[in-house]
Amino acid sequence: MHRSRLAQLVIDCETTDPDWAAQFWGQALGCRISSLGDASDEMYRRLLVHANQPCVLVQAVPHASRMHLDIETDDVEAEVVRLEQLGAVRIAQVKRWWVMAAPTGQRFCVLPPQRRDFPAHSNVWR
């Protein structure tokens, strides 16, 4: 048994300046901006949304700008296997998570819990 749920929306911005990208999205969505606090996460900025809204990250990336979803889980491998059975494919492993592609082509990530209240409102899979 494992659990999973939508963790966050990630706004991928083709830039080397995450502060510049976050400035626009923060103002557009009415959010304050925060870093993640770890030097290895320097390409990310968190938009501070209300507690009842999905988390939003802004990420500086070298590829074309797009948005993707992150699914958080207490068992990354089990969730990846479950999603593969639905037709998703593994694209790349990054740190402790997997970048995947849905059968419809969209990219998304499967990663360990990101929000403090996990596993609240999560799905239980057997």
Image (cartoon, grey):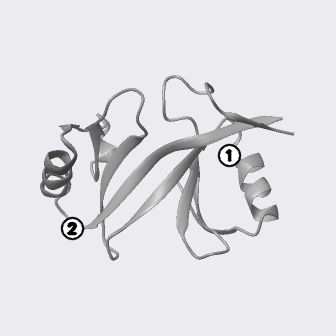
x then y, percent, for residue 31: 20, 38
What residue type is disc 1 on?
Answer: Val
Question: In this rendering, is residue 80 above or below 8?
Answer: below
**In the displayed structure image, the side of residue 60 where residue 100 appears, left or right:** right
Q: Secondary structure at mark 1?
A: helix
Query: Residue most toward the right?
Result: 126
Q: CA distance from mark 1 to mark 2?
A: 29 Å
Q: Residues within 10 Å of mark 2 (few under 14, many from 20)?
A: some
Which residue is depicted at the point 63% across and 27% down?
A: 119
The image's mark for residue 15 is 2
Which residue is depicted at the point 27% across and 48% down?
A: 42
Whichever of callouts 1 and 2 sits on the residue coming sooner in the sequence is 2
Q: Report which residue position mark 1 lands on.
A: 76
Question: Would you say residue 96 is visible in this rendering?
Answer: no
Q: Nearer the viewer, residue 49 or 62?
A: 49
Q: Determine which quarter of the picture holds residue 30.
A: top left
What residue type is disc 2 on?
Answer: Thr
The quadrant in which the C terminus is found is: top right
Which residue is depicted at the point 20% across and 55% down?
A: 18
**In the displayed structure image, the side of residue 109 where residue 50 appears, left or right:** left
Which residue is depicted at the point 32% across and 71% down?
A: 65
